[in-house]
Image (tube, rainbow, N blue to C red):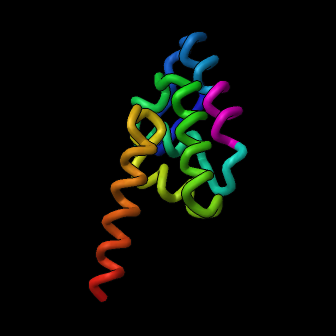
Amino acid sequence: HRKVGDGVAFERNPRLMVQFDRLERALGGVPGMNVGALVGRCTEVATCDIARATANLLTLRGAFKVGKISAMVMDCPKLLMCDDLEDRIRRTQACITRMHELL
């Protein structure tokens, strides 16, 4: 059995194992990314759309320092799955800018 997260074992499910391997290839290149811990934290990641997750990683990479991305995704795994990430980032940046202008 492949261990994920805090020792939760995947059943011997070939499709799930293939998906997990694809996730490791897609996300494993991000510094500090622990795919097993990520899936343990949010099991939905195990069945997410790899193309969406990869596109969202690239979007995050364009907006934030690469060293911050793994912590962001670990804190909020659904960043990999949302379909409006660019809009969310724009709104967040606008909010931060407004707050900074008030200081």
Q: Residue at the location (53% across, 37% down)?
A: 4
Residue at left 46%, top 32%? 45
Residue at 60 percent across and 47 percent down: it is 34
* 53 lies above or below 99: above
Residue drawn at (67%, 49%), measured in percent from left and top?
30
Residue 98, quarter of picture: bottom left
- Can the viewer see residue 43 in this picture? no
Q: Nearer the viewer, residue 71 or 90?
A: 90
Q: Position of residue 26 (x, y in %)?
A: 66, 34
Question: In the rendered view of the protein, which quadrant contains the C terminus?
Answer: bottom left
Left or right: 77 as drawn, with respect to 19: left
Considering depth in this image, is 49 or 87 the residue closer to the camera? 87
What is the x, y in percent for residue 63? 55, 56
Work out whether 72 lies above or below 49.
below
Question: Where does the N terminus fall, quadrant-wise?
Answer: top right
Q: Residue furthest bottom?
A: 103
Q: Is residue 69 magenta?
A: no
Report the magenta residues as a range.
Answer: 21-28
The percent coordinates of residue 39 (x first, y second) are: 48, 37
Pick the front one: 31 or 81: 81
Q: Position of residue 78 (x, y in %)?
A: 39, 40
